[in-house]
Image: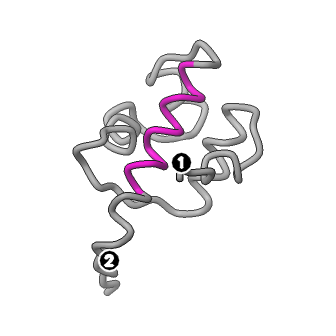
Amino acid sequence: MSRATPISYKNIENYTELGLNISYYRKKKGMTQEQLAEKSGISRSHLSSIEAPSIVKTMSLELLFRIADALEIKPYMLLKFRE
């Protein structure tokens, strides 16, 4: 039985930024949520919750790598947050 690690309050903003970056690069690429979700191997609703700034949704590094690959960008680009 696995237990989810609670999200640290100080990381909530990082998850929001990550979701916004995914949304930005998806739109820049001209992709719909459905298209990116399919290429990443997740449901559209899962991707929608990751991108939504009002929802804090964690993700694995594996998923981050798959999303970056589907967007044809380096994974670090999704983690470049505004200062």
Magenta stretch: dominant SS?
helix
Q: What residue occupies the far front of the structure in this picture?
A: 83
Q: How many marks?
A: 2
Magenta residue check for 25? yes
Residue range highlighted in magenta: 15-27
**Mark 1 element type:** loop
Question: Which residue is label 1 attached to?
Answer: 82
- The location of residue 50, given as percent across then percent down, is 38, 45
- What residue is rendered at 22% in x and 44% in y? 54
Q: Quadrant of the N terminus?
A: bottom left
- The location of residue 31, given as percent across then percent down, is 56, 17
**Would you say 70 lies left or right of 32 here?**
right
Q: Is residue 13 above or below residue 18?
A: below
Q: Residues within 10 Å of mark 2 (few under 14, many from 20)?
A: few
Dividing the picture into quadrants, the one containing residue 29 is top right
Dividing the picture into quadrants, the one containing residue 7 is bottom left
User: Type of residue at label 2?
Assistant: Ser
- The location of residue 4, given as percent across then percent down, is 31, 78
User: Type of residue at label 1?
Assistant: Arg
Q: Is residue 22 above or below residue 1?
A: above
Question: Which residue is label 2 attached to?
Answer: 8
**Would you say 3 lies left or right of 43 here?**
left
Q: Are marks 2 and 1 in contact (CB under 8 Å)?
A: no
- The location of residue 14, given as percent across then percent down, is 44, 59
Magenta residue check for 24? yes
User: What colour scheme does the image use?
Assistant: one colour
Q: Does label 2 or label 1 sit earlier along the sequence?
A: 2
Q: CA distance from mark 2 to mark 1?
A: 19 Å
